Amino acid sequence: MTPHAARIFLSSQPSDARSLEKVIAALQKSPELLADYERQLQTDHIVGETISGLPIPPLCQEELAGIREHAAATKAKARFHPLDPAMLSVTVGFLLLVGLLTWHFLGRAGVFPEEALSIATEGVKLRTDQFEIVAEEAGVLEDWFLMKGFERFRVPSQFAKFQTAGARIFKIEGQQVGVLAIPENFMFFMVFDPAPLGIEIQPEGSWRVAEFDYKYAAAIREQDGMCFMVVIRGTKADLEDLIAAKLKG
Amino acid sequence: MSAAQDDWPFLDDAWRYALVLTGSETAALELLRSSLNKLARRSDSGDSARARRILFASLYRQSLAKPITSEPSTETEARTRPLHELKEPGRSALTLIGMKLFAGEELAGLLGESLPSLAKSLEEARRRVTIKMHP
């Protein structure tokens, strides 16, 4: 950089300190221009001193204090104005989030758990020869399952009188599922612990009913930490009728 | 110090700059009040540095839109007269550089000038103010 270019550069007091060092080094090659720059600094300093030293008249000081308060108050109002584009964006975003969460949780409340449908789908694939022959009522098989290593096998009292043709345990995602084959209505009863599978059916004792694979229907409820599921070959309406009849009876 | 004072630490400097622009204490206050009201209505004034930049730019633009020339009636007004009588943008550039409120690049943006143009205006303003202060 030439001393002349350096002098022009320094006229506007740039802020880049690293550039400034190089520029002043270039300027020092010309004592005349360096002296001119020093005069500039002196003039700027005098101007600065003149202005900074200006006393603010008492009346102006009072007015400035009032302006401070007023401006700060107005600024605060403007900052939180509901029609401010930024505030509108935040509000709309918040409402959308609330709506999404509400939809998610309310929707989830009445939905048949996807994981339970997987269990039902696996259960209906079992062939007759894969069951052990058990000719007992469904409600008395708790000990039979206990002997097989499956604890807490429970059948709701309304379904306890169904005659069983076979029983077995199968695993899905490492979790045991107790299954009964019920000749009446071509039904299966399935009992499993819902917690490890991420299934939760609230409120306790309420039923969820769904159709699957075009020809089956499943109904599930949770009681005392265990799920009981009825699977029939039929429609959702058929299963709802069956449950209603059992609940009445 | 109140929260309001924290919000406007540069207000005294703004009044002094407005005094240079108008040459009158009363007119300076009017100009400052008007600019602050504009600033307070903006939702993007952001932090203190940004608010300061917007305020000083507003003072400059308003003074350009409605130039005010006053005869000094107080000692304070008389002391600013050499600066007040300078032409823009050199007057504002020299005043704000002297007050060390803005560096060259920021000042050029605030006044809407290129750096070379700002340098030229500053040189002219410095030359004139030196003559007026030390005739």
Image (cartoon, coloured by chain):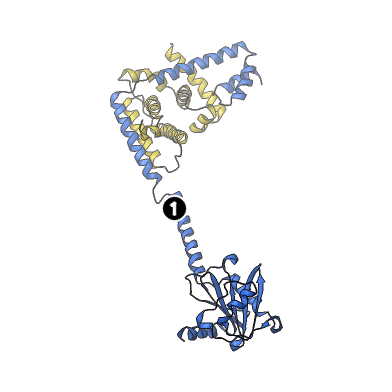
Q: Color of chain B here?
A: yellow
Q: Which of B97 and A118 is in front in this view?
A: A118
Q: As drawn, which residue projects farthest toward the right?
A: A129
Q: Percent position (x, y) of residue B87?
A: 45, 24
Which image quadrant is residue B83 in?
Answer: top left
Q: For mark 1, name the chain.
A: A
Instruction: Determine whether, in the image, residue A20 is placed left or right of residue A66.
Output: right
In this rendering, position of residue A233 left or right of residue A46: right
Task: Residue A194: give x, y in percent of width and height.
Answer: 57, 69
- Amino acid at the residue labelled 1: Leu
Looking at the rendered structure, the secondary structure element under dot 1 is helix
On screen, residue A134 above or below A226 = below
Residue A1 is drawn in which quadrant?
A: top right
Residue B68 position, x and y percent, is 36, 28
The structure residue drawn at horizontal position 38% and vertical position 33%, both measured from the top left corner, is B66
- Residue A175 lies left or right of residue B90; in this view the side is right
How many other residues sit within 10 Å of disc 1, few (<14), some (14-19) or many (≥20)? Answer: few
Residue nearest the observer in this picture, A119 or A71: A119
Q: Which residue lies furthest to the left in this view?
A: A59
Chain the render paints blue: A
Q: Is residue A214 visible?
A: no
Q: Residue B79: where, in percent of width, then height?
A: 37, 17
Judging by the rendered image, the residue that carries numbered circle 1 is A88
Say whether residue B117 is left or right of residue A85: right
What residue appears at the point 59 percent right and 88 percent down from the top-left corner? A184
Of residue A240 and residue B34, the one placed in the foreground of this image is: A240
Q: Tag count in the figure?
A: 1
- Residue A129, above or below B58: below
